[in-house]
Image (cartoon, grey):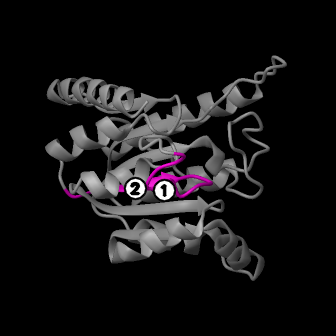
């Protein structure tokens, strides 16, 4: 399994590198969240010092999961260990993690900033505005940003059939507000990935509908951040 994962990572790396060489913007649609590792490697070769804005229910910083080194549970651990061109990892909505992951992230110092879902919820309940929390999230990021969006970062009402749903999470509009604020700050979105959208086995189109609309927003905000699309007034 690990050997096959290395092959997949290499294919994604080569394809992303080719896309970037053509002056295009890279965007990956998963699949599980292990998919974008090769893309991270390619984009940091072209644009070192990027930040990754990571929406997820999970930290994804396990060294390995049951011996599997390149699963969706280890994507950010592998990134931090093997891709020095990633300057900063900012995680939003994290609510399912183990002690090992928290300890590991602490060893990274200022390179990793986690906005735990429980802390976000408490701040909102106690009266802090989402605008203020969002400004804090955006302030942690460098000028060039890759967005890595696991659909289970949203409240499971938006993605009930994703593989590992967890209670809590962001509202769709809250996530979109962060993306808008990122662009309004003058930062540039250099690419993105969207992962873990899964179909309803009973045939409902709800998960696909939400995933498609989020993909549309990610695309639009990326283009706007690069001056290729106009932003609508608030």
Residue at 71% across / 74% down in the picture?
124
Tell me, yes or no, whether the highlighted magenta stretch contains residue 55.
yes
Q: In the displayed orientation, state which residue is furthest to the bottom.
A: 126
**Would residue 227 be seen by someone viewing this image from the given angle?**
no
Residue 106 place in picture, x, y as percent? 43, 76
Q: Position of residue 74 (x, y in %)?
A: 46, 49
Q: Nearer the viewer, residue 193 or 132?
A: 193
Mark 1 residue element? loop
Determine whether 144 is above or below 2 in the image: below
Q: Which mark is residue 77?
A: 2
What mark, if any, has residue 62 been given in the picture? 1
- Dots 1 and 2: beta carbons under 8 Å? yes
Q: Is residue 58 left or right of residue 184?
A: right
Q: Earlier in the sequence, mark 1 or mark 2?
A: 1
State the extent of the magenta-drawn residues as a range. 49-66
For the point 67% across and 28% down, the residue is: 198
- Considering the numbered disc 2 on the image, is that residue within a helix, a strand or a loop? helix
In which image quadrant can residue 87 be found? bottom left
Task: Answer yes or no: is residue 166 visible.
Answer: yes
Query: Split into 4 quadrants, where in the image is the N terminus?
Result: top left
Within 10 Å of the Cα at label 2, are there few (<14), some (14-19), or many (20+) other Cα atoms?
A: many
């Amino acid at each position: 399994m690990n050997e096959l994962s290395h092959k997949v990572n290499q294919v994604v790396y080569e394809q992303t590198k080719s896309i970037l060489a053509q002056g295009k913007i890279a965007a990956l649609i998963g699949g599980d969240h292990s998919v974008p590792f090769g893309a991270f490697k390619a984009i940091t070769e072209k644009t070192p010092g990027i930040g990754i804005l990571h929406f997820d229910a999970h930290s994804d910083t396990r060294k390995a999961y049951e011996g599997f080194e390149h699963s969706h549970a280890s994507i950010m651990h592998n990134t931090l260990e093997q891709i020095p061109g990633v300057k900063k990892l900012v995680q939003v909505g994290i609510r399912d993690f183990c002690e090992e992951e928290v300890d590991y992230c602490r060893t990274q110092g200022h390179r990793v900033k986690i906005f735990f879902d429980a802390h976000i919820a408490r701040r909102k309940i106690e009266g802090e505005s989402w605008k203020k929390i969002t400004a804090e999230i955006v302030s942690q990021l460098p000028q060039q940003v890759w967005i890595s969006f696991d659909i289970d970062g949203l409240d499971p009402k938006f993605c009930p059939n994703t593989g590992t749903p967890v209670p809590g999470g962001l509202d769709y509009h809250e996530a979109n507000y962060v993306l808008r604020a990122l662009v309004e700050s003058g930062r540039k979105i250099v690419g993105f990935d969207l992962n873990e959208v899964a179909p309803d086995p009973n045939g409902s189109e709800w998960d696909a509908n939400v995933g498609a609309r989020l993909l549309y927003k990610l695309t639009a905000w990326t283009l706007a951040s690069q001056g290729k699309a106009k932003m609508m007034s608030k």
